[in-house]
Structure formats: structure tokens, C-alpha cells
Image: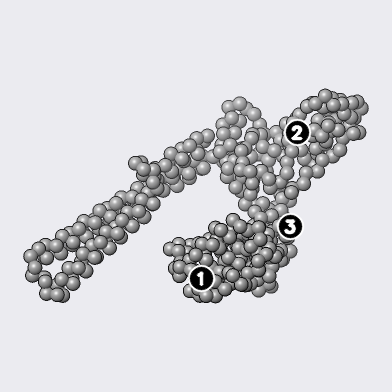
Amino acid sequence: MSVILPSLSQEIERLYDEENGQPLVSKCVEETHEFKTQLKKLKAHLNKHIQEVEKGDDEKKGNKRRKDLVVEKLNKAHRQWDHSIKKNYKHASQQHSKISKFLQNKLHEFDLDEVYVNKLHPESRTNIDKAISFHISRYNVGSLPVNGRQEIIDYLGQVYGVTQDISERFVQLGQIVQDLKNGDTRSCIEWCHDDSLLQFELYTLNAMQLFQNGDVLNTYKYLTENIPNSAFKYRQHQVITQVSPLLTQLLLGKRADDFDNKLQLQQEKCISLFTKDYCAQNNLPFDSALFLIILSGVISFQFFTKYKSIRASAHVDWTTEDELPFDVKLPEFLTRFHPIFICPVLKEETTLENPPYSLPCHHILSKKSLERLSKNGTSTFKCPYCPVNASKAKTKKVNFVML
């Protein structure tokens, strides 16, 4: 069980070409582009042949032979492309099937309930339901088929069972995100703060939308006259990388080849910036707790499988309910979604019953450590990390705050 990830990595590596390390799917796309290039060349030869026939030069020596060569090359190119695509597709499909079976077999061998012995209390069901409702509202509210305030509340309640006290917090978020997806930035511009990064990106999105519609003159006027100068203040990098290239395309009268893709990326950037600002202003987390917890669980899964083997061989058990019996390395953004403190003396996470306390030297210990060192507050003691003497009366309870 402890080799699930390395084994899975080996299986995934087989989805890549052994010679150049290129994904088989990308190789199919590349070969298709090459085939299209060959077709264009052969098409040019055939058009030339047709022109010669129309001019009455079809009896010219070698003309028929040239036509046969073009057709022969066309058939050969198609056969090679067809064979390669089918071969890579077959290999990728077979490997995908192997990976699916591998995961199913390995996961069925492992029962998480045998490892995680501290089950959730029945009263936790209410908190779980709230977390699910919050998650649905946070990520789905911008993709609903309705847009009115009461319609959104009713839809979330009837379809997903989300209570009104939760859905009301996300109504405006959903309405503005839907407007942005439809190419309308007015509601978001009215909502955002003046001279903010979001405002600048919305102005840029408006200009790109005008340019996409072929309105070159209005696009130029919008960039040079309609946008307040304050929007460009302290935005030199964005002006150089976003506005200047757009003005250059206006002067040349030609859009970049990937302009539509850039417009889509700009729209997604505005939606992401607005969502972050909205969540910050309304005291809402940008990522739902359900997402963070499940992602942490997925990353931690390999450690649970290892712990099962260690527990069976060493006959050790899970004795702490509020912390894991092993260390899990999580990405930084997952370690900041709730504050924790591990007592450096007892090596245990502080809790409501065992809160952290600060000594006069500003070193922090848990309440249990403090009582043990001070003999329940009856004597002074020396800090475990420096020579400063302390007493329980001179300590202060610590409250961690997320900034």
C-alpha cells in the first residue's frame, strides 16, 4: 500500500512517448497538424493540375503522371496518419484502462475506517451540511440558469437544499459573475473600488471586447479618453504588458492570432479578481472549507496507507483525537486555512481545553506544559528555550489571528 504513488507514477509515464517524453495525445495533435500541412501542399499541386487541364494542356507529357503522383502521395500520407493516430489512441486507451483498474484494485485493498478510528460525532452532521451548502453556493452561484435575487435563493434551496441564510451571502457574487460571463462589465465596475487592480482589468476587458467586435475607432477612443488617468496610476507593468500591445494592434489594424484566447483569459482573470475581492469584503473564505479538507485528505492518503502498515507491525494505536499521529507535508495555502500551534515541549497541538500561553520572554507553551513546569502555579521555573525565569502569574493566554 505504501507504494501506490510511485506505482501510479510509473503507470502514468506510459502515457508519454518513450523517445521524446511527449504525451501521446500531444503527439496525435502534432501529427494531425503535419497531415494538414501535407494536405495543403497536395491541394496546391492539384489546383495547378486543374488549371492546366482547363487550359487544354492535359495532353502535355508527364501531366497525367504528375496527377497520379499527387493522388499516391495523398493516399500514403493519409495511411501513415491514420495508422499513427489509431496506434497512439489504442495505446492511450489501454493505458488509461490499466490505470483505472490499478487504482480501483489498490483502493479496494485499503479501508480508511481501519486507520481513522476517531469517527465524527453524530452532531457534526449539521456542520457538514453547512459546509456542503457553502461549497455549492460558493462555486455554483455564478453558473445558475437564473439571475434574479429571489430566483437564485429559491433555486439553491429547491435544487440543492441550501438554506437562505447561506445563499443570501452569495447572491450578488452570482449575479455579477454571470454578467461578466455574458460580457457585461457594468455591474462589476459599479461594485469595485476606484483605482483598484480589478477596475483596471475591467477597463482592459472592455477595450478588448470592443476590438473583437471590429470597432477600432471606438476602441482607441475608449483607451485614450473614457478611462480615467487614475486607473493607470502605479500600473506601469500592466500598461506595458496589456494596453500597449492592444494599442499597437489597433494602429496596425490587425488582431493577434490568439486574440480570442487572450480575451477569454482576461475575462477569467476579472472573474477571479472580483471573487477574491468580494469574499474579502464580505468576510468569506475564497476557498470553501470542504474543498480544503478534501484536498488535504487526498494529499494525506499516502500517509494513511503507510500508517496502517506501521500500526500493524509495531502494534501502535491512534491516541490523540485532535491531531494526526504522523506528519503530513501540505502546500502552503493548505496550512494557512486555520491557525494551529504545536507545543514545543509536549509536541501536541493546542486546543480549547489546552490553549497556548506566552511566557515573559515571549516563548509560547501549552497550558499543560505550563502547569507541569510551574507545578500547578506553585513555583517559578526556567523557560525551556532561554535562561529567563517565569511564573504562571506572569504568563498571558495567546490568541492567534488570521491576517
Name which residue type carries label 3: Asn
Q: Which residue is drawn at 11% across and 70% down?
A: 58
The answer to which of marks 1 and 3 sits earlier in the sequence is 1
Residue nearest the viewer, comparing 51 with 146: 51
Please provide percent x and percent y for residue 176. Answer: 64, 68
Please provide percent x and percent y for residue 309. Answer: 56, 31
Q: Which residue is drawn at 49% across and 40% down?
A: 106
Q: How far apart are marks 1 and 2 (CA)?
A: 59 Å
Q: In this view, does 386 lie above or below 114?
A: above
**Contact check, label 1 and label 2, Cβ < 8 Å:** no
Please provide percent x and percent y for residue 403. Answer: 74, 49
Residue nearest the viewer, comparing 365 with 325: 365
Q: Is residue 119 visible?
A: yes
Name which residue type carries label 1: Phe
Q: How far apart are marks 1 and 3 (CA)?
A: 37 Å
SS of the residue under disc 2: loop
Residue that numbered label 1 is attached to? 211
Q: Can residue 367 be seen in this view?
A: no
Q: Residue at x 56, y 58 (%)?
A: 240
Q: Is residue 106 above or below residue 371?
A: below
Look at discs 1 and 2 and give the one toward the viewer.
1
Q: Residue 147 carries which label?
A: none
Residue that numbered label 3 is attached to? 283
SS of the residue under disc 3: loop
Label 1, residues with CA under 10 Å away: few <14, some 14-19, many ≥20: many
Residue that numbered label 2 is attached to? 343
